[in-house]
């Protein structure tokens, strides 16, 4: 299953993006979740293709046909695309965090609640054992709470991802039949993740570095 820094969180989204507009994660010189830039497009596409190969080997749908389009989202004009960078600047994950929940499938009351919505989370399969997808989801939950949101929501289109997202604390809230299949709508209450920094440290830990 696809397991599909902290100093930046207090700045407005467009200010975060403007400071790094032309610099890739590799040249920004620090690990963590960073605003994506156009310079990250090649690395995001390479990572997406690696994940697609892994998914295909498991007999699952992949992003291969849409890898270039997905990577181009790293141009990030709205400041809502984020990359997870390793301690050497390598991109090992990306996700999109938007302010608005898609209107279909949710009640009017739910749509009135402040929430962030996660799209297209992709991670490098070489790092699966360290669960970078879970780390990005928890980062989003913590960040949403910092910004006064009540929920983090997401959708997926097959039961295996429902089970996977449940391991990250998301609950299945609605099932919606769309033209091309069933969509599973999930959510988790926003809240502080007490051990988030420890989780980041564990992701970067190498033999001989204390963890």
Image: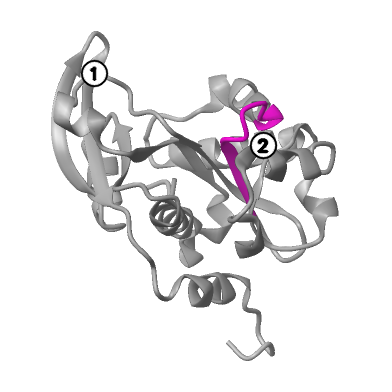
Q: Along the polypeptide, which appears first: circle 2 or circle 1?
A: 2
Give the residue at x 73% y 37%.
Answer: 37
Q: Is residue 139 above or below residue 55?
A: below
Return the residue nearer the eye: 4 or 50.
4
**Is 152 a magenta residue?**
no
Asked whether the residues under the numbered discs 2 and 1 touch, taking CB atoms below 8 Å apart as contact, a structural biologist would say no
What residue is drawn where x is 55% and y is 26%? 64
Neighbourhood count class around disc 2 (C-alpha, 10 Å): few under 14, some 14–19, many 20 upward: some
Residue marked by disc 1? 104
Res. 78 image quadrant: top right
Front residue of 167 and 158 = 167
Q: In which quarter of the image is residue 115?
A: top left
Q: Disc 1 on helix, strand or loop? A: loop
Q: Where is residue 39 in the image (x, y as percent from the top left)?
A: 80, 36
Can residue 79 be found in the magenta stretch?
A: yes
Does 124 appear above or below 57?
Answer: below
Tag of residue 14: 2
Q: Residue 97's x, y, as percent?
A: 48, 38
User: How many angstroms separate mark 2 from mark 1 (CA)?
Assistant: 28 Å
Q: Where is residue 207 in the image (x, y as percent from the top left)?
A: 65, 85
State the residue at coordinates (62%, 41%): 13
CA neighbours of label 1 inside 10 A, class few (<14), some (14 to 19), many (20+): few
Total numbered labels placed on residues in the image: 2
Q: Is mark 2 on a helix, strand or loop?
A: helix
In front: label 2 or label 1? 2
Question: Colour mode?
Answer: one colour
Left or right: 132 as drawn, with respect to 155: right
Say left or right for 143 vs 32: left
Q: Which of 83 and 167 is in front in this view?
A: 83
Is residue 20 at least partly visible in the picture?
no
Write the start and end of the magenta stretch as one range: 74-84
């Amino acid at each position: 299953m696809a397991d599909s820094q902290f100093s930046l969180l207090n700045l407005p989204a467009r200010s975060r993006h403007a400071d790094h507009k032309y610099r890739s994660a590799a040249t920004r010189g620090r690990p963590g979740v960073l605003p994506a830039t156009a310079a990250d497009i090649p690395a995001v596409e390479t990572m997406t293709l690696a994940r697609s190969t892994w998914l295909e080997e498991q007999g699952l749908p992949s992003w291969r046909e849409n890898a270039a389009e997905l990577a181009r989202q790293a141009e990030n004009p709205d400041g809502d695309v984020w990359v997870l960078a390793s301690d050497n600047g390598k991109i090992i994950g990306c996700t999109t965090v938007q302010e608005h929940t898609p209107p279909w499938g949710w009640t009017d009351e739910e749509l009135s609640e402040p929430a962030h919505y996660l799209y297209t989370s992709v991670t490098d399969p070489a790092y699966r054992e360290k669960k970078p997808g879970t780390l990005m989801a928890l980062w989003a939950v913590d960040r949403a709470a910092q910004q006064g949101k009540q929920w983090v929501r997401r959708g997926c289109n097959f039961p295996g991802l429902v089970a996977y997202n449940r391991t990250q604390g998301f609950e299945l809230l609605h099932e919606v039949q769309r033209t091309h299949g069933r969509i599973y709508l999930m959510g988790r209450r926003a809240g502080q993740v007490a051990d988030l920094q420890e989780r980041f440290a564990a992701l970067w830990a190498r033999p001989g570095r204390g963890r």
